[in-house]
């Protein structure tokens, strides 16, 4: 039987964790409404929504240079897959995301979202047909465009298409800007969260000297190592990307050539990626990826380029491609906003708001994302 109490966790010998004893005087304790673990895109939007609603929040985040949110290119693409179909809930997600990023951008004084359409060079007649088929559909997001202006930069055999509208999120200024605001208000603890220091009771949670009504796990792939969430049907999806200097490539667009996407990056550089690896031997960047993408760039580009950097990260993903949102079905003092997979930039703002409204006003969650759908698995 599942016991919603950290005694169950602390006494779980399989994990061989030390039993932490809190030795606190009443004067040491700090109370807050909510404790959030992680300040990637999920922790950023959840803390933003809760604070906006007047709640007191503490975020614990230990910075990691290659977290998923830090290496993501930041694209919100309305279409997906070989059949170029509209992505799930895209109309609601895109309009919500545009407003949410602009609102938080205004708060931190940074531009964090921009429209930058994707120019697509299909690598086969099959992909040309898939794009062409969408053009005449209502709200298809796909246009055919003249390829003349790209002849000097890219080698391509087929027609060119444009995906529009596409949004590009600038994650670096967003994460840093919001972190600065959290620090100014003394809402951020920059340290590693240690599960063995968490104590849960029927009324609240206590972490070291912090007492909160609820704790939310937004710590990316680390959430799935957690005793309470480890049975969720998650998957780690590794993504690698190169940073290249391609001075002659105009920065006003995103380009997609087969599996390679060229996205404007900071300092006039270009993000080139990525891989989607469900099986991998190392979490680190591999020579194999670097060599194969560098070779593709030599074939695809007619203009000079230099590879400057190479990084890898793990996307926290859900096996059935719908995020994990809500309160633990057997332990409601614990919540989760996670499993965003390849689409954190569009999903996180929308579902962070939904989760905040659920917790504060008891508004319902979208059933397809509510983590209660895994009540059986989470009971084990
Ligand atoms: C190469 C690549 C390209 C991508 N491109 C896109 C894209 O174009 N568009 C898109 O929508 N999505 C993209 N994604 C996916 C997107 O990055 C993820 O969906 C999203 O970033 C997940 O955010 P998160 O907040 O859940 O996790 P994370 O970004 O991993 O954030 C977790 C945070 O928790 C902190 N943390 C973890 N453990 C602890 C601990 N024990 N104590 C304290 N802090 C802790 C970490 O430091 C981090 O700050 C891409 C991902 C990759 C890898």
Image (cartoon, rainbow, N blue to C red):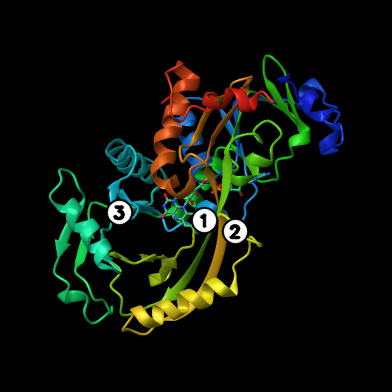
Residue holding disc 3: 114
**In which image quadrant can residue 187 be found?**
top right
The residue drawn where x is 56% and y is 32% is 336
Give residue 70's mark: 1
Q: Is residue 30 above or below residue 96?
A: above
| Mark nearer the N terminus (1 vs 3) | 1
Q: Quadrant of the C terminus?
A: top right
- The answer to whether the residue labelled 2 contacts the one labelled 1, judged by CB atoms less than 8 Å apart, is yes
- Is residue 251 something one can see in this rendering? yes
Mark pair 2, 1: CA separation: 7 Å
Spot occupied by residue 274 in the image (x, y as percentages of width and height): 46, 63
The residue drawn where x is 22% and y is 54% is 164
Disc 2 under 8 Å from ligand 1? The reply is no
Crowd band around label 2 with a 10 angstrom C-alpha radius: few (<14), some (14–19), many (20+) = few
**In which image quadrant can residue 206 be found?**
top right
Give residue 65's mark: 2
Callout count: 3
| Left or right: 192 as drawn, with respect to 254 | right
In the image, 249 versus 366, the foreground residue is: 366
């Amino acid at each position: 039987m599942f016991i919603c109490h950290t005694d169950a966790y602390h006494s779980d010998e399989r994990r061989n964790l030390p039993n932490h004893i809190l030795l606190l005087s009443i004067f040491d304790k700090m109370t807050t409404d909510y404790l959030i673990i992680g300040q990637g895109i999920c922790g950023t939007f959840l803390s933003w929504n809760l604070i906006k609603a007047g709640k007191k929040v503490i975020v614990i985040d230990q910075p990691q240079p290659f977290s998923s949110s830090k290496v993501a290119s930041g694209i919100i693409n309305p279409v997906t897959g070989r059949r170029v179909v509209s992505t799930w809930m895209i109309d609601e997600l895109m309009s919500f995301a545009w407003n949410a990023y602009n609102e938080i951008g205004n708060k931190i004084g940074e531009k964090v979202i921009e429209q930058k359409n994707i120019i697509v060079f299909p690598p086969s007649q099959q992909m040309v047909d898939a794009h062409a088929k969408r053009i005449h559909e209502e709200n298809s997001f796909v246009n055919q465009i003249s390829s003349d202006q790209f002849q000097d930069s890219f080698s391509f055999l087929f027609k060119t298409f444009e995906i529009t509208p596409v949004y590009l999120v600038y994650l670096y200024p967003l994460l840093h800007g919001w972190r600065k605001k959290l620090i100014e208000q003394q809402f951020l603890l920059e340290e590693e969260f240690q599960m063995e220091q968490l104590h849960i009771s029927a009324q609240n949670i206590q972490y070291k000297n912090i007492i909160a009504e609820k704790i939310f796990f937004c710590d990316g792939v680390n959430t799935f190592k957690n005793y309470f969430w480890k049975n969720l049907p998650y998957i780690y999806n590794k993504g690698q990307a190169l940073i290249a200097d391609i001075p002659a490539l105009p920065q006003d667009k995103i380009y997609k050539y087969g599996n390679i996407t060229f996205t404007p990056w900071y300092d006039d550089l270009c993000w080139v990626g990525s891989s989607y690896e469900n099986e991998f031997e190392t979490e680190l960047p591999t020579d194999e990826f670097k060599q194969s993408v560098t070779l593709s760039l030599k074939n695809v580009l007619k203009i000079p380029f230099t590879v400057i950097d190479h990084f890898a990260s793990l996307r926290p993903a859900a096996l059935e491609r719908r995020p994990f949102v809500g309160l633990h079905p057997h332990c409601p003092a614990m919540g989760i906003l996670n499993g965003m997979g390849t689409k954190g930039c569009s999903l996180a703002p929308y579902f962070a708001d939904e989760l905040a409204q659920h917790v504060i006003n008891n508004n319902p969650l979208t059933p397809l994302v509510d983590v209660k759908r895994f009540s059986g698995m989470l009971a084990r």
